[in-house]
Image: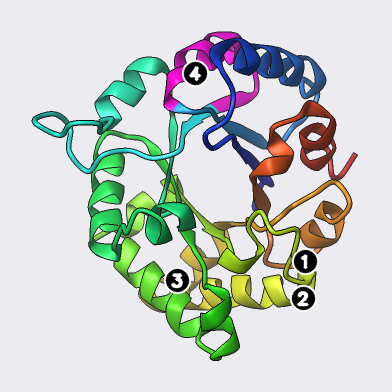
Amino acid sequence: MRIPYIAGNWKMHKTRAEARSLAETLVRDLADVGHTVMVAPPFTAIETVAAVVSGTNILVGAQNASSALEGAHTGEVSPLMLKDLGVSVVILGHSERRHTYGETDQLINAKVATALGESLNVILCVGETLEEREAGRVDDVVRTQLEGGLAGVDRSALQRIVIAYEPVWAIGTGKTATPQDADAVHGAIRTRIAAMYDERAADELIIQYGGSVKPGNVRDLMAMENIDGALVGGASLKAETFVPIVKFNA
C-alpha cells in the first residue's frame, strides 16, 4: 500500500525567522498526521527548520543539490553539506531548474546518482510545457525525462525515489490539470516504470502531483488511483493553506 506523501517547496521565500515561525506552526498543527510530510526551505533556512522539526513527523528537504560532493564549484551545495544540516530528501529536476536554469536530463541524472550515493531520498520532477502539451507530446516528454533522470539507477534504489509530475503550465499560474488528466499522466509514468523495471516497482512507486495544488482541489486529486501525494509550491508558504492540504483526508 502506497503511503500519501505531501511535500512543501518553499522556493526562494522565507528569512530564517519566518521559516522558524512557519515550521513551529506546522509541527503543532500536523502532529497527528500519519502520512509522509516534508518541507523544503531555501538553503539559508534549512538548519533553522531542521532544528525545529527534529524528532517530529516532518522531514526536511532541499530544493536542489550539486552533482559533486566537493571541490571548485562556486555557488553549489553538496549532498554532504545537506546531510550535515539534517536534510534527508532532495528535490531534483524541478521545472524551474530545467527551464530557467537550463538543467539537462544528463545533469539531473548525475545529481540523482550523487544524492542516492549519499543515502538521500530523491523527488525527481518531470512534466511538460504548455507548448509540448498542445503538440500532443506529453507522454514523449515525460518518458524522456524519466528515462534520462533514472539512467543507471538500480531497481533496489527505487524505494528511495519519488516521482513528481508537474505540468509546467500549471505551476504558479492558478491553472490545474483536471484530476482525470493528471491521473492519466501518473498512470503513464507507472506504465513506463514497469517497462524499465517491473510491475511491482511500478505499483510501489509514490507519484506526486505538483501544479497549483490548493486546499480546494487536493481532495479530488488525491482520490485518483495513481496520485499518491502532492508537491506544493505557493500554498505551502502559509500554514492556513498547507495544513488543510496535508490533512486532505481528515
Mark 4 secondary-structure assignment: helix
Find the distance from the CA under tag 1 to the CA under tag 4: 34 Å
Tell me what residue is drawn at x 69 percent, y 72 percent: 183
In this rendering, position of residue 193 left or right of residue 204? left
In this rendering, position of residue 162 left or right of residue 232? left
The disc label shown at residue 193, or none: 3
Q: Amino acid at mark 4?
A: Ala
* Residue 199 place in picture, x, y as percent: 49, 72
Label 3: how many residues lie within 10 Å, few (<14), some (14-19) or many (20+)?
many
Tell me what residue is drawn at x 65 percent, y 34 percent: 37
Give the label, 3 or 2, closer to the camera. 2
Q: Earlier in the sequence, mark 4 or mark 3?
A: 4
Label 4: how many residues lie within 10 Å, few (<14), some (14-19) or many (20+)?
some
The disc label shown at residue 72, or none: none
* Residue 96 place in picture, x, y as percent: 46, 53
In this rendering, position of residue 218 left or right of residue 58? right
Reply above or below: 176 against 92: below
Task: Return the residue at label 4.
Answer: 45
Tell me what residue is drawn at x 50 percent, y 87 percent: 137
Tell me what residue is drawn at x 83 percent, y 37 percent: 247
Q: Is there a contact, CB below 8 Å, between mark 1 and mark 3?
A: no
Task: Return the residue at label 2.
Answer: 180
Reply above or below: 235 against 207: above
Q: Earlier in the sequence, mark 3 or mark 2?
A: 2
The magenta stretch is: 43-59
Mark 3 secondary-structure assignment: helix
Examine the image and state in which quarter residue 210 appears.
Answer: bottom right
